[in-house]
Amino acid sequence: MKKKLNYLLLLLTIIYMVGCTNSEDASSTALEIDPQEANAVETNENSKEETLDDTVDNEPVDDPAVEETTTQSNNELFEGYKLIKVDGGDLSGYREPNAVVDIGYGDREYWAFTNEHGQLERVIADEIVLQDDSKEPVLSSGRYYSDEAKVPGVESDVLDEGHIIADSLGGVSNAYNITPQDSTLNRHGDQAYLEDAIRSAGGATNFEAIITYPNVETQIPSSYQYTYTLNGNEIVDTFDNVNPDEVNESLGLTESDTDDSTRSDTERDISSIDANGNGQVTIKEAESAGFSMPIMSDHWLYPYMRDNDNDGMVGE
């Protein structure tokens, strides 16, 4: 009996020792982590953090750089001037002094500046965008508006309501784009020529007009200077606000020969131009036939077209 008891105690002792050994091994296993496994875990955690950082960095954010640059540029450009809005068809001839106004029709940005006397002294445009009568509400006369601002001086018989930037080039008709301009100069002279050159080129860039006055009281300019770029070439046009025909005559440059454009209307045939055969030629019909706008009052085609504002030009 005693011998059996000893065997039982020995067996319990062995079981106890084995149990302690297994417990120590498990504890050791839990505490001892393979260095490579530790590095792998750490690398994985770092990768997750980097991915999270990249996700945050790559999130789309509003970049104000362009807007800030434009705003800053305009602020510098407009410094000393009051930015105001004036309806493009405002017929009032009044201009605020030291003001800057956008005179571009639609989305165009053409900036006009007045001096302290309310005289229109400068007009600029990064790009001249031609009128598009297929997308814009253009009247049958080729204009955006039926009339122009009544700037003091335009009531003269020899002065037109002259656009600095014509309707056909995307300009509006308020006082910040109109000056009293010699009628012949506006319709047939340098003013008409430069507008036609820009139209023929499909537009212009770096446009600037400088308007000069003989004194601080009048709104009638004495001269104009236009600088603009056509097809990579910078053009500078400078001319006085006078009748070029009178100047040419005084210089002995007037030709007495009758130009072909003044031939009798009876010698002309509009059947190939008048598409609908109604005896009238529209701007589109004239352009389709290869004629460039504007058609002046001395052009043989003019009597067959409608000049709604009676300024001697159609399609300007």
Image: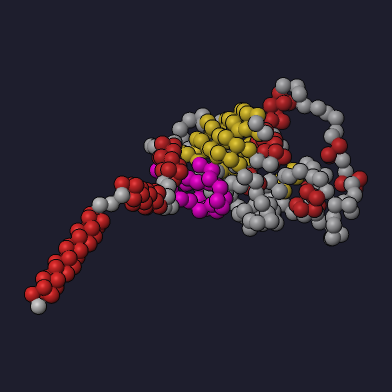
* Residue 105 visible in the shown view: yes
Quadrant position of residue 188: top right
Please tell me whether residue 166 is drawn above or below residue 11 in the rendered image: above
* Residue 42 visible in the shown view: no
Please tell me whether residue 44 is drawn above or below residue 235 in the rendered image: below
Q: As rendered, which of 257 and 89 lies closer to the eye?
A: 89
Q: Residue 269: where, in percent of width, then height? A: 90, 49
Q: Which residues are magenta?
A: 82-111
Q: As rendered, which of 67 and 308 lies closer to the eye?
A: 67
For the stretch drawn in magenta, the main secondary structure is: loop
Q: Is residue 93 magenta?
A: yes
Q: Residue 192: where, in percent of width, then height? A: 68, 38
Q: Residue 302: where, in percent of width, then height? A: 78, 47
Which residue is drawn at the image coordinates 63% and 58% (left, top)?
Answer: 137
Q: In the visual, does 210 lie left or right of 18? A: right
- Of the 4 image quadrants, the one containing the N terminus is bottom left
Which residue is drawn at the image coordinates 72% and 21% (left, top)?
Answer: 251
Q: Residue 45: where, in percent of width, then height? A: 34, 51
Please tell me whether residue 157 is drawn above or below residue 2 in the rendered image: above
